[in-house]
Image (cartoon, helix red, strand yellow):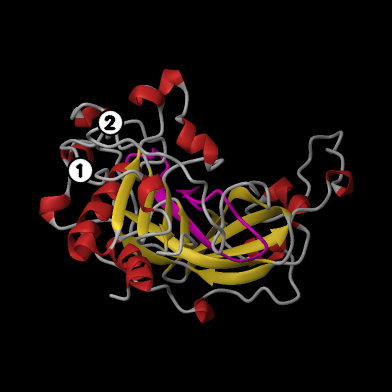
Amino acid sequence: MENRPAPPASQFPPSTGKSLAEVLNQASEPTQLVLTPGSTGFYKGENRYSFGVFTRSAKDQIADAQIALYAAKAPPKSALPKPSASGAKVGKGPLGRLSAELSNPAQGPYPAKVESLETEPAFRSKTTADDPDAALAIYTTKIDFPSNGEWRIGALIKDGDKMTATLLTSAVVGQFKDVPRVGQRPPDIHTPTPQSVGGDLSKLTTRIPPETMNKVDFHDVLGKKPIVLLFATPQFCESRVCGPVVDVAAQVQRDFGDKAEFIHMEIYNDNDPSKGVRPQVRAFHLPSEPWLFVIDRRGVIRTSIAGAFNVQELAEAVKAVTGG
């Protein structure tokens, strides 16, 4: 699977002077595809927004769609019209009754590029290879959110001369304010190592075979060396991307050698979802996973990614804190 550049914004309708409903209602019909957000933490300003694209059955991933996103601030609930007593739809077009909820001015288009999650064969784990649901690619774009609060996200999907539309889950900007951000110092946590678990690597990682991103304790290298800290659980991931991103990190670790310390932190106590999340996850206030932090040698976060990333994106982030 190959990386694909974002289609030109000129291929999609402009949003100037239009509500989100008016933009999306230019489509001929609702899409038959399912767009699943991969990002959860959003802040005022420009944000990386990732999502996957699947068939309606969610069995097959689509990696060649031409998609642009649009955003609009959600109106207050009190401003929405009451349901019609007759049961008639409010609004016309492919979105029907939802149009009233999308009445604020739209921003966009934000065309999305496709990023392959594939690695060299030597770094494709058995965990990923055996998982029929493991993601093969993600779509990413940048969206500017001028203010906190709920933002509705819509998409137009272009297929030749045909345009279809859908809505994604709302982005709630500023909701997870306690997650460490770029420019801040992360919590000074301890992370397990082979020595601390008596050499039983299955206690450190659910990846098969185990990777080697756990040689040092985060506490011992924070502020001394660049660090790549990845929270993910390949075996129990709910987002379909944890196995692939741990594979990605393992390959990039090989490429940078000892220029940075790579630390993979599992999510659940004793790698058992029934026992709750580990204290390290709680210390970072993470609402989802995977979540990546790239930290410079002064102990300051320089890159934070909620969701999936590919080899090129991680390599560029690590290069920025190691100098190459």
Decide whether residue 47 is among the magenta residues. Answer: yes
Range of magenta residues? 31-60
Front in this rendered view, residue 150 or 7? 150
Query: Above or below — where is 165 with respect to 272?
Result: below
Residue 181 marker: none
Q: Quadrant of the N terminus?
A: bottom left
Residue 211 marker: 1
Position in image of residue 252 (x %, y %): 24, 60
Gap between marks 1 and 2 measured at Cα: 16 Å
**On the rendered structure, is 19 left or right of 27?**
right
What's the residue type where badge 1 is placed? Answer: Glu
Position in image of residue 315 (x %, y %): 30, 66
- Which residue is outermost to the top? 274
Question: Which type of secondary structure does the marked residue at label 2 adopt?
Answer: loop
**On the rendered structure, is 210 left or right of 172?**
left
Q: How crowded is mark 1: few (under 14 residues within 10 Å), some or many (20 or more)?
A: some
Position in image of residue 220 (x %, y %): 36, 48
Is residue 1 visible in the rendered image? The answer is no
Query: Above or below — where is 316 with respect to 121?
Result: below
Question: Which type of secondary structure does the marked residue at label 1 adopt?
Answer: loop
Residue drawn at the location 68% of the way across and 52% of the way down:
174
- Which residue is outermost to the left? 122
Position in image of residue 223 (x %, y %): 43, 58
Question: Which residue is under mark 2?
Answer: 196
Decide whether residue 119 is among the magenta residues. Answer: no
Total numbered labels placed on residues in the image: 2
Residue 259 sits in which quadrant?
Answer: bottom left
**On the rendered structure, is 187 left or right of 317?**
right
Residue drawn at the location 38% of the way across and 67% of the way down:
317
What's the residue type where badge 2 is placed? Answer: Ser
